[in-house]
Image: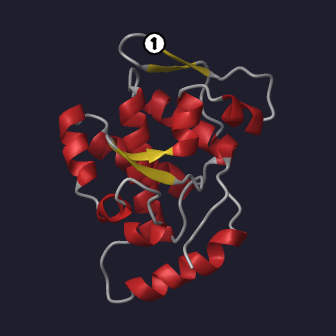
Amino acid sequence: MKARYIPDTGKALEVILWLANARPQIDVYHIVKCAYYADKRHLNLHGRPIAGDWYQADEYGPLGQCVYGLLKGSPIEILALQGNGSLPFNVTKPKHAVIPDREPNIGRLSESDREALAWAAENYADMSFEELLELSHEEEAYQKADGGRMAYEDMLDPSRDRDARARDLAQTARYAVF
């Protein structure tokens, strides 16, 4: 059994806004990668991802489907927000910078969520595209997915209790509320 979460689209939106406010002019690629590394860190420290996004092993590295769907204005993700169809950010052309229209709703992000996001922004937001591409392709979860859906269990850091932690993820994921 694999850990499968139901993504919280509203919380994924707040992740985007948090990163875009923390790092003005951050681009789509860097938001997607920072969200992945924040999720991985949070998973390893706290036993759950931030918004429950699911990751595809894409040509350019781990690709969170919900976060990326929001960034590209996917009608399904917008519908999941149950809003008026507009998003509180803009993506510039041609640099793909994400410009927020508002601050993130901090009430939707726990202190540990914000700490993981801050850590990811500090460590990955200033890397070049090429550096992030190479680094993300070295991820065990990315390699094992072989172009498919990445497993949260494979995002766990190596440890003596990794198998037990992976079983816990698989058992509790369906009950997770973000």
Q: Quadrant of residue 58?
A: top left
Residue at the image point whose x is 69% and y is 28% from the top? 75
Where is the N terminus found, in terms of image quarters? bottom right
Determine the residue located farthest toward the top in the rendered image.
93
Left or right placement of residue 112 versus residue 61 in this view: right
Vertical order, 133 against 153 (above or below): above
Residue at the image point whose x is 36% and y is 63% from the top? 141
Q: Which amino acid does label 1 sit on?
A: Thr
Vertical order, 24 against 77 (above or below): above
Q: Residue 161 location, x and y as percent?
A: 39, 88
Residue 84 seen from this side: yes
Decide: few, some or many residues near mark 1? Use Cα within 10 Å; few <14, some 14-19, many ≥20.
few
Determine the residue located farthest toward the front in the rendered image.
147
Q: Which of 176 and 59 is in front in this view?
A: 59
Q: Check disc 1 and report the residue beneath it.
A: 92
Q: In which quarter of the image is residue 111?
A: bottom right
Number of numbered tags placed on the structure image: 1
Left or right placement of residue 129 versus residue 89 in this view: left
Left or right placement of residue 62 versus residue 113 in this view: left
Residue 81 seen from this side: no
Q: Residue 60 location, x and y as percent?
A: 31, 40
Residue at the image point whose x is 25% and y is 34% from the top? 126
Left or right placement of residue 60 versus residue 89 in this view: left
Q: Residue 106 location, x and y as percent?
A: 63, 42
Q: Residue 53 location, x and y as percent?
A: 56, 52
Which element carries disc 1, helix, strand or loop?
Answer: loop
